[in-house]
Image (cartoon, rainbow, N blue to C red):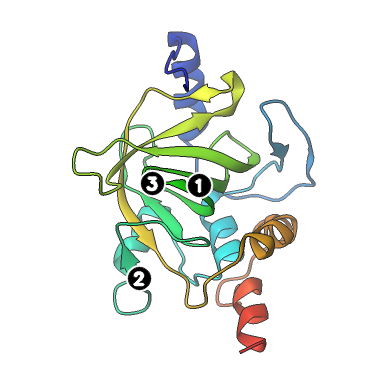
Amino acid sequence: MVSTHFPTRVAFVLLAGLVSACAGGSHAPTASTGGGVSYPGIACAPFARELSGIALYGDAASWWDQAEGRYAKADRPQLGSALVFRRESRLPSGHVSVVSRLLGPRQIQVTQANWVAGQLNEDQLVVDVSERNDWTEVRVWWPPIDQLGSHGYPTYGFIRPLVPATREEIVRATPTAAQLALTSNVGRPAPRARLLASRQ
């Protein structure tokens, strides 16, 4: 069973880390604590765009409306889909992560950038805690304490890529997506989208 203990001092660190959850920058990766790789300046939205192939831009929370008429939206996860978090006090720009593994009806793992400030974290647990079992509220693994966080984050749901991903593709593409996210150019197609489109 996953512990839900969430010390007050850690809550402060979490808040401080997430205030800039989707800011940008560019530096080389280094090893870090908390189970992730340090990519100073990495932001959630450019990384999710590069990894998923979902060509949306701007603040993470704005992706949900931008996806209308362009991508399928769902209340159930799919490998490679983007989980879009709403804006709230801890996430003023929202947040977006990519589904990397399906564990059960209410549990998935995601690969995401900048949940822990400046880090890339792979296969982090996310649990649906919504009253209607529709993924509109989730709790997210907090690597610095190696436990599930106690705060429930409101979400819109999942945006599905035009071409479904496999687990192997997600794992293989993650390091390249992180590097490209640090130097992404607006309007350049995301690399996984190009790769998968070329094989159709």
Dot label at residue 94: 3
Check the picture and name the quadrant holding the C terminus.
Answer: bottom right
Dot label at residue 89: none
Q: Amino acid at mark 2?
A: Ala
Residue on which the image places disc 2: 67
Q: Please tell me whether mark 2 or mark 3 is closer to you in this view.
A: 2
Locate residue 77: give its quadrant: bottom left
Residue on which the image places disc 1: 22
Q: Judging from the image, what secondary structure is the residue with disc 3 in?
A: loop
Q: Amino acid at mark 1?
A: Cys
Q: Position of residue 112 (x, y in %)?
A: 56, 47
Mark toward the start of the polypeptide (1 vs 3): 1
- Residue visible at 30% across and 79% down? 69
| Drawn side of residue 70 relative to residue 181, left or right | left
- Residue visible at 35% across and 26% down? 151
CA–CA distance in space, label 2 to label 3:
15 Å
